[in-house]
Image: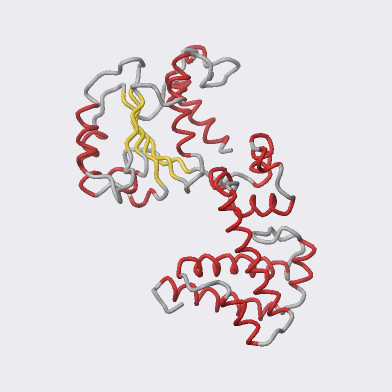
Amino acid sequence: GNDTLRARLYDDLRDGSLSHAYILEGDAGSGKRTLARDLAAALACEKRGNHGAGGVLPCGSCPSCRKALEGKSPDVIRIGRGERASIGVDDVRFLRSDVLVEPNDLENKIYVIEDADAMTVQAQNALLLTLEEPPPYVLFLLLCRNATMLLETIRSRAPILRLRPVPDALLQQCLTETSAAYVNLPEEEQRALVLMANGSIGRARELLQDKARKVLMDRRRWVRDWILCRADRKSYASQLEVMQAAGTGREEAVVLLAEAERALCDLLMLKKSDDAPLGFFTDRDAALELSARFSAGALLQWMEKTEQARGQLLRNGNV
């Protein structure tokens, strides 16, 4: 995915117009680390002079490429927070002194700062001094989920490149070609996994793990039971029983209500168009039948109440 973004970076690399720093913004699993790794390998590639074999960089076969792709190049330095809540000023002080040491193997030194939006203000200010006048051989790649968490002075010195969700069809193709575990799933679980990955290949691969996938399917089952309970006009006692099956954990309740909102949104949109894009249901015909059992007003009110309940839980309301 993100072919337009990759093409832009390829053109910058070919023309020798790469910026000295980029901010790569995207959700977890959106491919920020993969893009940073590939860009570092493209800079290292021994075929860079003739723009790669067939116009492709990195070539993936030369020794320099392989070292960068495998994380073995001494000139590709990763900085992250590990298990800590933030990246502190000491990490950046190391970087400020290290940039003065010329590259070992490559023409460039590439610093990949993971979770850059977790840098403290002091750390960001310390980094700013290096970003303003870096040595000509240095490239900084700041990976983050939310670039607005970075200081404006940081953002003004590095173009922000936003990674977009991968379309469902491309995500499904990727999983089909690379994962036997995905191919062996029942078709319903395949469709559900792609939907719930929200365009993230990384998230999809997490959901392929048996435990994560079971949690996913159990949540979807609960949402369907909850909606069917209302559709069948079950008693309040029966509705309460379904709700109690969700447990008393706050975090899980918040997730379940968020999934319920996605399902209700599908049903409401199907009131207006049979071809509406779906974010929860994998069987359009079944969703259309279910949507017909509610009025648009009832669905809208239900969504509002669900959102209100989720908001109360996020503010530490009683489960």
Task: Determine whether, in the image, residue 90 is placed left or right of residue 104.
Answer: left
Question: Residue 274: image x %, image y %?
Answer: 77, 63
| Residue found at x 56% / y 53% | 212
Judged from this view, the residue extending furthest toward the front is 211
Q: Is residue 270 above or below residue 113?
A: below
Choose between 202 and 143: the one closer to the eye.
Answer: 202
| Residue found at x 39% / y 73% | 315
Task: Determine whether, in the image, residue 310 is placed left or right of residue 151.
Answer: right
Question: Residue 15: image x %, image y %?
Answer: 46, 21
Task: Determine whether, in the image, residue 227 is placed left or right of residue 128.
Answer: right
Q: Is residue 29 above or below residue 313?
A: above
Looking at the rendered image, the quarter that the N terminus falls into is: top right
Q: Is residue 196 above or below residue 247?
A: above
Q: Quadrant of residue 36?
A: top left
| Residue found at x 45% / y 40% | 161
| Residue found at x 72% / y 67% | 270
Task: Determine whether, in the image, residue 60 is placed left or right of residue 80.
Answer: right
Choose between 232 and 11: the one closer to the eye.
Answer: 232
Number of numbered discs visible in the structure rendering: 0
Choose between 232 and 300: the one closer to the eye.
Answer: 232
Q: How is the image coloured?
A: secondary structure
Q: Quadrant of residue 39?
A: top left
Question: Residue 222: image x %, image y %?
Answer: 63, 68
Q: Is residue 74 above or below residue 117?
A: above
Question: Residue 244: image x %, image y %?
Answer: 56, 77
